[in-house]
């Protein structure tokens, strides 16, 4: 840069210097930069060193190939550093990441290359020797294999982005002997928090490929005809359910094209693929599922929650409108806790969805659930000021309505420490800031308990509030 070169020119010159080292130094330097700049999360020094030790086309992992991290740093000509505080290896500056993003030709097809490396290890004799049983301590099993977790959780993410013929072949090889594979156990434990999951027929290659959304691999597995397309995994989830949850439109399309696939099959929690797609807010997948004759758009799960109720989490207004456009869908259908979709929308703070639901005459804006909470109390509890204003615009909403414990929306807002919501509620004559709940506590008690000084000052400014009031326990 002192010679008048731009930063991009400097980076380009340094990359050329790395390549000019030749031999193993060039391979390690470019390889390290590729991994660091394209990995799905920051890598630790040991993870990076092991990744660069894997030999493609080898059935065994040779620990003797693992380079020291100091060697990698030297091969990269100062473009990477070891962040000791974060225990990771990173690029020297964020502008280098931007440079790589603008110069795709440096690494060729990095994601397929990374997928090939991951799959080569997962197909190795060392990985296949690691079996996961019902009582297996996964953390202890992989303590000396820190790279194994990354390979298991992210090989499919890289393969979906770029799938070479080699990666496709390696994936199919993995799935031919997938029963009991350690990578399946690690994936299930990480994504669905089932650390004692025992791999086998409850997690097939088709489930895995559908979860990652690798279209060509899914198509190849179906073509082999070795899978029951409606088989559930450890949670009763079918391949269609997994693809729908992740929003993999092309995989969903392939599966729905098979007449034997049941698009409305419930998992162990009673949820259908549509509810997973609605929760994720994937409009295209929701539209495809709603186009199936045998899909019930209002089917409740084991807790009474419908696809519309799950759509409240993502807050996708298009998905909500599509569901409400179905004749069978009840916009005010409560679950088994008497909680209707509006309460969930208020809880998650989706103002647009709240307005859409309130536009339906069937929706009760002041409905209590089985704990006595209303949509307003949920909005107050979760600091959703915009939703609070919308709900208070409805005459049916009682801003001072207590729940089963006598807690009012003001108490919930005071407990959350939201000064804006507290002021809005105090502006309503129906709200009594000195009202005691069933435990003898007033809003001030909750604000003081949680240390919300601003709310305490606001409440102490009201004459109805007695700062010396005792609760039921004195």
Image: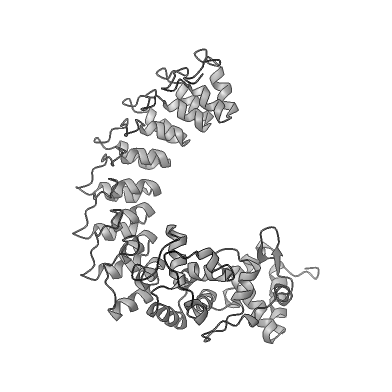
Image: 156 above or below 64: above
Give the residue displayed 48% in from the left and 35% down from the top: 383
Residue 428 horizontal/vertical position (percent): 43, 20
Q: Nearer the viewer, residue 468 or 255?
A: 468
Residue 321 appears anywhere in the view: no
Tell which residue pokes out farthest to the right in this image.
2
Q: Nearer the viewer, residue 139 or 280?
A: 139
Tell which residue pokes out farthest to the top in this image.
463
Give the residue displayed 56% in from the left and 81% down from the top: 61
The structure's colour scheme is one colour
Count the marks: 0
Tell which residue pokes out farthest to the front in this image.
135
Image position of 453 (left or right of 361): right
Residue 395 appears anywhere in the view: yes
Residue 236 horizontal/vertical position (percent): 31, 61
Q: Quadrant of the N terminus?
A: bottom right
Residue 121 horizontal/vertical position (percent): 52, 78
Image: 329 above or below 150: above
* Residue 67, image quadrant: bottom right
Image position of 142 (left or right of 21): left
Residue 368 horizontal/vertical position (percent): 32, 31
């Amino acid at each position: 840069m002192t010679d008048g070169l731009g930063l991009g020119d400097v980076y380009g010159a340094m990359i050329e210097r790395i390549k000019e080292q030749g031999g193993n130094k060039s391979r390690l330097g470019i390889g390290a930069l590729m991994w660091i700049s394209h990995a799905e999360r920051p890598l630790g020094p040991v993870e990076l060193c092991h990744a660069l030790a894997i030999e493609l086309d080898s059935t065994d992992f040779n620990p003797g190939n693992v380079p020291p991290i100091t060697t990698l740093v030297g091969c990269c000509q100062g473009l990477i550093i070891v962040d000791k505080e974060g225990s990771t290896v990173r690029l020297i500056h964020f502008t280098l990441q931007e440079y790589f993003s603008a110069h795709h030709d440096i690494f060729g097809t990095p994601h397929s290359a990374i997928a090939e490396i991951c799959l080569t290890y997962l197909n190795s004799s060392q990985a296949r020797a690691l079996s996961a049983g019902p009582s297996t301590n996964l953390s202890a099993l992989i303590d000396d294999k820190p790279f194994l977790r990354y390979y298991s959780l992210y090989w499919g993410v890289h393969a979906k982005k770029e799938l070479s013929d080699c990666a496709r072949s390696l994936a199919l090889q993995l799935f031919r002997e997938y029963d009991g594979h350690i990578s399946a156990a690690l994936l299930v434990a990480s994504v669905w928090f089932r650390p004692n999951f025992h791999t086998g027929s409850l997690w097939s290659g088709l489930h895995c490929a559908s979860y990652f959304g690798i279209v060509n691999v899914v198509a190849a597995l179906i073509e082999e005809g070795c899978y029951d397309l409606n088989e559930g995994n450890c949670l009763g989830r079918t391949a269609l359910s997994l693809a729908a949850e992740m929003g993999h439109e092309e995989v969903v399309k392939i599966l729905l094209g098979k007449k034997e696939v049941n698009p409305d099959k419930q998992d162990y929690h009673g949820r259908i693929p549509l509810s997973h797609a609605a929760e994720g807010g994937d409009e295209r997948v929701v539209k495809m599922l709603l186009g199936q004759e045998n899909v019930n758009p209002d089917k409740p799960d084991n807790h009474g929650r419908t696809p519309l109720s799950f759509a409240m989490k993502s807050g996708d207004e298009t998905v909500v409108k599509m569901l409400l456009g179905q004749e069978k869908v009840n916009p005010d259908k409560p679950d088994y806790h008497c909680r209707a979709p509006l309460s969930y929308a208020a809880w998650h703070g989706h103002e647009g969805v709240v307005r859409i639901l309130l536009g339906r005459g069937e929706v009760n804006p002041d409905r209590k659930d089985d704990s006595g909470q209303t949509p307003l109390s949920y909005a107050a509890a979760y600091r959703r000021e915009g939703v609070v204003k919308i709900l208070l615009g409805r005459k049916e909403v009682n801003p001072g309505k207590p729940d089963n414990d006598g807690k009012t929306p003001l108490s919930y807002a005071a407990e959350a420490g939201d000064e804006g919501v507290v002021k809005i509620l105090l502006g309503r004559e129906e709200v009594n800031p000195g009202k005691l709940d069933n435990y003898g506590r007033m809003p001030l008690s909750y604000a003081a308990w949680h240390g919300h000084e601003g709310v305490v000052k606001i409440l102490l400014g009201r004459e109805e509030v007695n700062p010396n009031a005792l609760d039921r326990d004195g």
